[in-house]
């Protein structure tokens, strides 16, 4: 476990900047930065940008000096590195392109939803998660699902549009937001199905035969089956969203969530997810539970 800093060589705003990263967790990085008086606005996805004048002081406070190349390699190895394609500017453009296909000529609503997904207090329920759900649906949707495609993808866009970290209440508020924006612009049956699907993401317990519910819930839980590195980023982001909780309280709550997920049978409902995601997801969940 270490906080690393590279030499100040990155020019911006009339000075040069260093990068400050953790090899263990974003929680460790944020704690170090806060203790050093670095404002949260200096955080950029997986690192803090710090001006040259702070470099020596941060080393004195415990940041380890490494080269820029070694810092990047260590960050990648830690699993906390955010790939370039998932960084904010490219990610927003990619998501807006998807929105235009889904809802042509209504860019304002897509932009409003992305603004919500990009709120500063979020660390996991962000545009990165939205893209992950949409990419999960890309894999799970089959030709026979064409009649369901639009309603399921719309539900994905709305399912965490409201997020304050209050289970159940967030889903209800997100479902209400969907009704508010979609009512009158599409058939009532579609609006009600989007509402229903968003509410399902509170418990991820769709009824047998609810193909649309199976698709959305499986895609929402696709993150559990990520590579060990991706799962590490996910777990760190979840802790970040609950940074207001003391460690003991968070650990107890997180342990309960992991145990519930591990007892779900099946964890995934669609055939593709069952075949490709169940094994990795259960391994990741069990390893995180053992680490708590």
Image: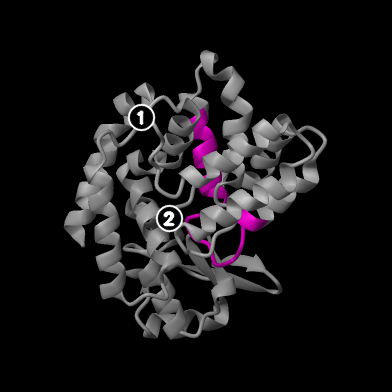
The percent position of residue 16, horizontal first and vertical second, equals 61, 71
Numbered badge on residue 269? 1
Image quadrant in which you'd find residue 288? bottom left
Q: If the image is split into quadrants, where does the N terminus sit? A: bottom left
Q: Secondary structure at mark 2?
A: helix
Question: Which stretch appears magenta?
Answer: 116-137
In percent of the image, x 60 and y 20: which residue is there?
A: 147
Q: Is residue 110 left or right of residue 175?
A: right
Q: Is residue 218 left or right of residue 8?
A: left
Which residue is farthest top?
144
Numbered badge on residue 72? 2
Label whose residue precedes the other's in the sequence (2 or 1)? 2
User: Pointers 2 and 1 in contact (CB under 8 A)?
Assistant: no
In percent of the image, x 52 and y 27: which residue is there?
A: 138
Query: Which class describes the residues within 10 Å of circle 2: few (<14), some (14-19), or many (20+)?
Result: some
Q: If the image is split into quadrants, where does the C terminus sit? A: bottom left
Residue 65: in sight, yes or no? no
Q: Secondary structure at mark 1?
A: loop
Residue 250: in sight, yes or no? yes
The percent position of residue 106, horizontal first and vertical second, equals 80, 40
Front-lying residue, 125 or 46: 125
Q: Does the segment drawn in magenta span residue 245?
A: no
- In this view, 56 is above or below 150: below
């Amino acid at each position: 476990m270490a906080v690393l800093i590279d030499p100040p060589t990155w020019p911006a705003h009339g000075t040069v900047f260093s990068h400050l990263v953790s090899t263990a967790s974003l929680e460790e990085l944020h704690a170090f930065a806060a203790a050093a008086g670095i404002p949260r606005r200096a955080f950029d996805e997986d690192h803090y940008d710090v001006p040259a004048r702070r470099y020596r002081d941060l080393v004195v406070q415990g940041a380890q000096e490494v080269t820029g190349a070694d810092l990047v390699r260590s960050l990648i190895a830690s699993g906390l590195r955010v790939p370039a394609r998932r960084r904010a500017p490219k990610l927003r453009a990619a998501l807006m392109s998807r929105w235009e296909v889904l809802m042509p000529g209504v860019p304002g609503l897509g932009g409003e939803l992305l603004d919500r997904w990009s709120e500063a207090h979020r660390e996991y329920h962000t545009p990165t998660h939205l893209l992950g759900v949409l990419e999960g649906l890309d894999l799970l949707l089959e030709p026979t699902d064409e009649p369901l495609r639009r309603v399921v993808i719309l539900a994905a866009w709305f399912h965490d549009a409201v997020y304050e970290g209050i289970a159940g209440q967030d889903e209800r508020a997100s479902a209400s937001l969907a009704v508010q924006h979609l009512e009158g612009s599409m058939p009532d049956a579609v609006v009600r199905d989007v509402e229903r699907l968003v509410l399902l993401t509170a418990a991820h317990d769709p009824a047998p035969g609810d193909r649309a519910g199976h698709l959305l819930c499986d895609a929402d839980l696709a993150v559990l089956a990520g590579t060990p590195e991706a799962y590490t980023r996910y777990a760190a982001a979840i802790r970040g969203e609950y940074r207001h909780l003391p460690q003991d309280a968070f650990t107890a709550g997180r342990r309960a969530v992991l145990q519930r997920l591990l007892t779900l049978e099946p964890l995934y409902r669609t055939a593709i997810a069952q075949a490709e995601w169940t094994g990795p997801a259960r391994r990741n969940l069990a390893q995180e539970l053992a680490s708590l």
